[in-house]
Image (cartoon, helix red, strand yellow):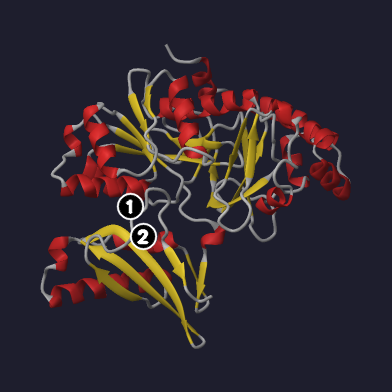
């Protein structure tokens, strides 16, 4: 028997929009009454919560940025007293103080429901054994996936990141059906399995939920071909709830957003104007059911688009295009705009390369230079110099065709590029 919330994925759009409007109006009122930051922002814009009479009116209201959360660190954005908060998470804070997010008991229930819907959409049931290999602690990945799987009734193994040999042992010995981790870490797991003569295809593992970093369709196909499992995309961000904001259905035609909780918009990153369905821009979310720390029009920095057409799976929930890049991931090299995902697509389309690469950007006097380091298979690396040169030229030509920029391509032997148990570091900008 399916959980009650499963039916929300197939709700009539008119009923859904009525619910969204009601929840949005209640959220704006709560923000105005309880959060000084929003009250001041509304007053400066000459707005009251009652000015939201339809969903389109949301575009009149101000955005929230990551800097706003850091400026009000740690608890300045709370809409409830601290004694109502039962959980605190935070981002890594690599560029300063961490971004703090707080949850009431009700928020945790919504979060668990969201991730349960992700797993249900991916064919997971209470009969499955789920291993969580995202990091636990302040990072939302581990506990978010954990409580979602438990809410679905799964048997959960809270492994966490690292310890690749132990990951392999547990996948085999514990009969793991479902794995949750970053796509780059799973590729590392596949490599270790190959080194040890361990055949993942002979285990019970059938599906992986991969997120926490941008990854391409080419990466999905590489994972599925080499491991035999189904690779699902799970999207989320700590500021909104954590993992579970959206996910793939079996059609893999965009990620369904659980928009009864997270209202999406696509805006022009420069002007802030709302874009039409199907147009690409920056993804913005408003939390419409969150209690402890609701956010209004939060700018994610992720580049995507929205499709409201009914999916072939039958779900009526809006679909967002798979996020392959962020607005702040963009590199400008000799006047050319470049995203790491463009390079990844090229590399994974070339036979003989491994899915491990790094972009090094240097400045020689006044000229920016891009070096692409990519691992090649052991067979290719041991081949004659002429074959390596041919492969290098092929990659250079394809990069030039795609981005219009000449890049130095360095082919390195397997294992030379540093592995990560979390998010892969793809770019080293040495110009600073």
Q: Residues within 10 Å of mark 1 (few under 14, many from 20)?
A: some
Residue occupied by mark 1: 218
Residue 53 can be seen in this image: no
- Residue 86 falls in image quadrant: top right
Q: Is residue 40 left or right of residue 416?
A: right
Q: Which mark is residue 344?
A: 2
Q: Residues within 10 Å of mark 2 (few under 14, many from 20)?
A: many
| Residue 416 picture location, percent across and down | 27, 64
Q: Is residue 166 left or right of residue 133?
A: left
**Above or below — where is 214 with respect to 152?**
below
Residue 118 can be seen in this image: yes
| Residue 294 picture location, percent across and down | 69, 36
Depth check: 111 or 313 in front? 111
Q: Which mark is residue 256?
A: none
Depth check: 400 or 316 in front? 400
- The numbered mark, 2 or 1, whose residue comes first in the sequence reads 1
| Residue 157 picture location, percent across and down | 36, 28
Q: Is residue 67 left or right of residue 46?
A: left
Q: CA distance from mark 2 to mark 1?
A: 8 Å
Q: How many marks?
A: 2
Residue shown at 16% from the left, 61% from the top: 378
Residue shown at 26% from the left, 33% from the top: 171
**Above or below — where is 246 with respect to 372?**
above
For label 1, the SS is helix
For label 2, the SS is helix
Badge 2 vs badge 1, beta-carbon distance below 8 Å: yes
Depth check: 173 or 224 in front? 173
């Amino acid at each position: 028997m399916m959980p009650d919330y499963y039916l929300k994925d197939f709700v009539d759009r008119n009923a859904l929009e009525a619910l969204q409007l009601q929840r949005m109006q209640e959220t704006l009122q709560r923000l105005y009454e309880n959060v000084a930051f929003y009250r001041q922002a509304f007053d400066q814009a000459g707005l009251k919560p009652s000015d939201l009479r339809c969903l389109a009116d949301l575009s009149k209201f101000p955005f929230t940025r990551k800097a706003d959360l850091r400026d009000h660190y740690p608890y300045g954005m709370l809409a409830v007293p601290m004694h109502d908060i039962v959980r605190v998470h935070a981002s890594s804070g690599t560029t300063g103080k961490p971004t703090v997010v707080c949850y009431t008991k009700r928020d945790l229930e919504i979060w668990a429901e969201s991730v349960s819907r992700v797993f249900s959409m991916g064919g997971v049931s209470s009969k499955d054994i789920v291993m969580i290999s995202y990091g636990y602690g302040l990072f939302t990945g581990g506990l978010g996936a954990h409580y979602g799987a438990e809410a679905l009734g799964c048997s959960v193994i809270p492994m966490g990141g690292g310890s690749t040999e132990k990951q392999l042992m547990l996948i085999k010995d514990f009969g793991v059906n479902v794995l949750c981790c970053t796509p780059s870490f799973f590729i590392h797991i596949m490599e270790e399995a190959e080194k040890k003569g361990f055949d993942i295809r002979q285990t019970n593992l059938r599906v992986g939920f991969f997120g926490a970093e941008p990854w391409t369709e080419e990466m999905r196909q590489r994972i599925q071909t080499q491991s035999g499992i189904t690779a699902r995309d799970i999207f989320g961000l700590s500021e909104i709830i954590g993992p579970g904001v959206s996910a793939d259905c079996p059609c893999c035609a965009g990620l369904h957003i659980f928009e009864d909780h997270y209202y999406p918009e696509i805006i022009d990153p420069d002007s802030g104007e709302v874009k039409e369905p199907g147009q690409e821009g920056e993804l913005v979310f408003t939390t419409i059911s969150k209690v402890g720390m609701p956010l209004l029009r939060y700018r994610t920095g992720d580049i995507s688009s929205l499709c409201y057409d009914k999916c072939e799976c039958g779900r009526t929930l809006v679909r967002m295009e798979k996020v392959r890049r962020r607005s702040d991931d963009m590199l400008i090299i000799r006047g050319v705009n470049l995203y790491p995902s463009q390079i990844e697509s090229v590399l994974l389309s070339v036979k003989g390369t491994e899915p491990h690469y790094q972009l090094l950007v240097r400045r020689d006097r006044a000229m920016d230079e891009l070096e692409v380091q990519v691992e090649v298979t052991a067979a290719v690396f041991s081949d004659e110099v002429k074959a390596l040169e041919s492969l290098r030229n092929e990659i250079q030509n394809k990069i030039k065709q795609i981005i219009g920029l000449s890049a130095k391509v360095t082919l390195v032997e397997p294992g030379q590029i540093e592995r990560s148990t979390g998010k892969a570091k793809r770019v080293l900008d040495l110009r600073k």
